[in-house]
Image: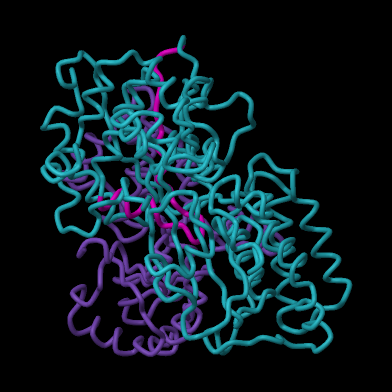
Chain colours: A purple, B cyan
Amino acid sequence: MSFHPQMEYAPARFHRSERKLADEGQPFAYTPENQAKFDENVTHYPPEQRKSAILYALYLAQGQLGYLTGNAMRFVAQQIGCSTADVEDVVSYYTMFYRKPVGKRVLNVCRTLSCALLGAERVTEELSRTLGIKPGETTADGEFTLIEVECLGACDRAPVVMVNDDWHERLAPEQVSKFIDDLKARGSAVFTGCHLKKE
Amino acid sequence: MAFEPVLTPFVGEPNAHTLDFYIQRARGYEGLRKALTMQPNDLIEQVKASGLRGRGGAGFPTGLKWQFVDKKAEPRYIACNADESEPGTFKDHVLMERNPHLLIEGCAISCYAIGAKVAYIYIRGEFYHVQQVLEAEIEKAYKAGFLGKNILGSGFDCDVYVHRGAGAYEAGEETALIESLEGKRAQPRIKPPFPAVAGLYQKPTAVNNVETLCNVPLIVLNGAEWFAALGPEKNGGPKLYCISGQVKRPGVYEASMHTTLRELIYGETFAQGMAGGKKFKAIIPGGSSVPLLLDEHLDAPASFDGVQKAGSLLGSAGLIVLDETVCMVWLAMNLLHFYRHESCGKCTPCREGGNWLYQLLQRVEAGEGRMKDIDLLFGVANNIVGKTLCAFGDAAATPVLTTLKLFRHEFEAHVKEGRCTLPSEWRAKHPVMAH
C-alpha cells in the first residue's frame, strides 16, 4: 500500500493478504473522442516513452467513469504498454485519482497554513455539518464528496475550495450553508472561479 | 529610483494573456528573435553574467545550471517546474495565467541555449484552469511561428508541451519531477548523476522554475547589466513576493530585492499591514519549509542573501504573516500534517519521522503532552535533517525546530496547563484527531 495517508495509511492494520483489490467494475474502453485525445497526447513524448502519458491516460479514464476501476486501470496498462501493477503503482500515489466512486461534486477544502489562518478548519466543519458527512465521505444522494486537501496554491484568496476542476475563493465559514444552497440551485454558476480570470 | 514591474506590469489588464497584447504592449518575442541571432554559448554567458538565480527555492545560478548540461549527449530537454505546491507560494500561478507568453518565450530561448528541442511544462494537477489558458496560448504561439519547426526562419525547432501532474507536492523536487514526467511515482533520485547529465529519460535536462524562465527573455532583451542593476549584488532582477496570512492585502507583489520584509508587510503598495488591528507575531519568509523570523529581523532586505543573513531562507518567496492569535504548537502541527501527507515514502527518516512528529505535536496541542515530549520532538526532528535523499526531510523538520527554538515557552505552557494556551476562534471548534 502507499504511504499516503489518504490511501489508508496504516501498514500495521492492513496485512497484505487483507488488501482490498480495486473494484473491477464494468468492462472498460475509451470513447472515440478520448481515444483520439490519448493518441494525440502520446505523440508529445518520444515513441519509446509512452509511459509518460500515463497520468493523462488516467485522467481520461477517470473523466469517463468518475473513478478508476480495475478494468479501467487494465485498459490504461494496455494503451501504455506497461503492466497493470505499474498503473496501480501510479494511481495509488497521486491524490487526484479516486479508486472509489465519488460524488458528482467533490469539495476539496484547502487545509494548509494560509487557508487555515483564515478559517479553513471552520469551513470544513460547516460543510461537514451542512452536508451531514465527515471529510472523506460522500452524501447518500451521491451529490457531494468532502475532502480536505493540502495547499492549492491560492493562499492570497484563502480559504479556497476546489470543486472538481473549478475554484471557489474566499469562502468564509458563515457563507457555507448559503453556498451549498446556491450550489444545489444554480450549479457551477456560483463559483467565483480564479480571481485572475476577471482582472 | 522607483521600481517598475517587468514580469507583471500588465497582469491587471483584461487581455494581458493574449498573444496580440503581448506583442503590441510588452515587446513580445523580441527576446526570442534576438536570441536566435546569438550563439547558444553566448546566451548562457549572458545569463551567467546577469546573476539570475533560480526562483524555485534553492537560488542556484541559472546560467551555471545550463552550463553544466552535457552538450555531447542528444537529445536534451528543458523541464519547466510549474508544480507550485509550497504552502504560501502562488506566484507562478499569476505568471502562467496572466503572462503565459513570457513563459513560452522563456522556454523557447532556454531550449535554444542548451540545444534542446522540447520543453515540458510540468503543471500541478490542481491548476486545471491555468493549464487551459496556457495550452490555448501555446497553440497561438505555434500558429504565429514562435514555436514548432524552423522558428522565425532560423532553422531552430522547438516544441513546448504542458504535462499535468496529479496532486503531489514532492513532484516539485527536480528529480521527482523527472520521475513523474516519465510516468512514475514522484520520488526523488539519488544525486549524482544530476539532471544536467542524466535527467529525463536519462538524457541531459535543465529543470527551471516558471519565474526563472520568465526572466530569461528580459535578460536577452535588456542585457545582463540592466538585470543585475535591478537588485542588490548577487540578487539581481525583479522578484515576485507572495504575501498571505493575516495581512490586510494579501497577494503577489513584484519588487526589487532591495525591499525589506517590513516594507512588504506594512508598505502601502504591498500588504498594508496586519488585518483586524492585531499585533504581528512572526513571519515565514519563504514558504512553509523555512525557519520563522521575528519583528527584530524585518529590516533585512528580502533577498536570497539578506534573508539568509537574518537566519532564514528566501526559498520560493512565499511570505506567510502570522498575528498574535497564532498558537505555535498548532502551527507546527498544521505544517506537519502537510509534510506527513506529502512525504513520498522513499526515505525512512522522512516517512516515519514526519508521522511521529505529527503525533507528538497532536498530543502536546491537545494538552496531553509530557515535558519529555518536547525533547523527543527535538530529537526526532534532528534525526530527519540531512538524512534523506532530497530537501523534503529538512523541510519537514524545520517547522518543529524553528518553533521550538523561538517559542519553546508555548510548548511548555501547553504541557503545564494541559490545554492549548492560545485557542483562536478561526480554528476548528471540534478538532478531529487524525491517525
Tell me which residue sits at (18%, 29%) in the image: B146
Which image quadrant: the C terminus of chain B?
A: bottom right
Q: In which quarter of the image is residue B222?
A: top left
Tell me which residue sits at (48%, 34%) in the image: B178
Q: Where is residue B275 in the image (x, y as percent from the top left)?
A: 46, 80
Outermost residue toward the front in this view: B1
Per the rendered image, the range of residues in magenta is B73-98
Q: Where is residue B218 in the image (x, y as percent from the top left)?
A: 32, 35
Q: Position of residue B239 (x, y in %)?
A: 43, 48
Outermost residue toward the top in this view: B72
Query: Can I make out residue A14 in this image?
Result: no
The answer to whether residue A153 is above or below residue B391 is below
The answer to whether residue B190 is above or below residue A169 is above
Q: How many labels does the image show?
A: 0
Residue B85: within the magenta? yes
Left or right: where B183 falls relative to B347? left
The answer to whether residue A29 is above or below residue B320 is above
Q: Position of residue A138 (x, y in %)?
A: 40, 76
Query: Can I make out residue A23 in this image?
Result: yes
The answer to whether residue B307 is above or below residue B428 is above
Tell me which residue sits at (47%, 70%) in the image: B266
Q: Quadrant of residue B135?
A: top left
Left or right: where A36 falls relative to A149? left
Task: Say which of B381 and B12 sits in front.
Answer: B12
Task: Say which of B327 and A56 sits in front.
Answer: B327
